[in-house]
Amino acid sequence: MSAPLLQDKVVIVTGAGRGIGRGIAMLAAAKGAKVVVNDLGGAEDGSGSDASPADKVVDEIKAAGGEAVASYASVTDWDEAHGIVDMAVTTFGSIDCVVNNAGNLRDAIFHKMTEEDFDSVINVHLKGSFNVSRAAATHFRAKTSGCFVNMTSTSGLIGNFGQANYAAAKLGIVGLSKSMALDMGRFRVRSNCIAPFAWSRLIGTIPTNTEEEKARVSKIQQMTPDKIAPLAVALCSDAAQDVSGQIFGVRNNEIFLFNHTRPIRFAHMAEGWTPDTVLDRVIPAFKADFFPLERSGDVFSWDPM
């Protein structure tokens, strides 16, 4: 009988008290991992704290015969983020994988978005992913192995209304993940992104004031958080040691691989460009290949399968 896929791996999952993070933590433990269940227990907008979500997941893992410990630290704080990694090493003796899943939402149409709305979402998603990853990186470098799994979103990869803060954070995570893959690859450390489609507590804050919004939310409700866990756990395994720098998506029973931004058209003028020649030559030549302003639902227009 073969050993479980993540036998004796030590995995940190941030935002693991509910939703997608909980599903990943539960499956990782079921596959043999020792799991640090990190969750501040805040509200959807990131405010407040509550130890019970993390404690409940730890209890569930232990009841199923697994090993887990709860962390209530905030990923937005440098010292607390390092404390999450220290807890993994102190409790379980090592750290093998970080799943950066902690998040919050403060949706607002752009001209009504406050500085606090923007900073809060950037701090949790983007800075939080950096903080925990940076804390783990020292250990990964020393042991010449490790894995980062980072949650991005089609709100950043494609676009969406009322989510400038969230889109900026999630597309920033793609850049962060690529940089970690490039910088840490020499130490056999890999980093990948997942854009999850799933109904969760955060998605439940999306407005449903119009029929279009109601239809969008209805589709999302069909996609349960546990659908994300198999890909995340697979990426944490040694069997995926050659997979790095990629962007995946999970939508119900569908898994996608996203492309990376590359030039698609080229123009050259030996004597250099002026504003007039740009307008006269470049814009007309490129216009047929301009990307339309689309939202996630425009690209993923079919019902989840």
Image (cartoon, rainbow, N blue to C red):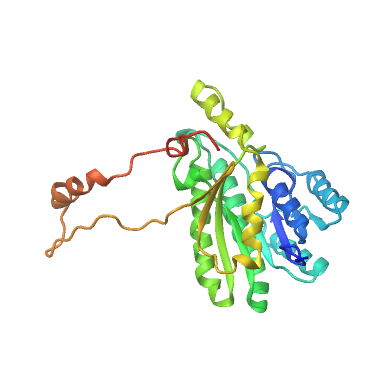
Image vertical order of residue 129 relative to residue 23, above or below: below
Image spot of residue 219 (x, y percent): 56, 31
Q: Which of these two is toward me, 121 or 143?
A: 143
Q: Which of these two is toward me, 49 or 149?
A: 149
Q: Residue at x 26, y 46 (%)?
A: 289
Which quadrant, please, contains the C terminus? Answer: top right
Residue found at the far front of this picture: 1
Q: Residue at x 48, y 42 (%)?
A: 164
Image spot of residue 15 (x, y percent): 69, 49
Residue found at the far left of this picture: 271
Image-based side of 272 in relation to 11, left or right? left
Q: Quadrant of residue 6?
A: bottom right
Image spot of residue 75 (x, y percent): 67, 55
Q: Residue at x 86, y 55 (%)?
A: 65
Q: Is residue 15 visible?
A: no
Image vertical order of residue 140 relative to residue 305, above or below: below
For the image, the number of numbered tags is 0
Image-based side of 194 in relation to 23, left or right? left
Q: Quadrant of residue 5?
A: bottom right
Q: Residue at x 14, y 50 (%)?
A: 281
Q: Quadrant of residue 99?
A: bottom right
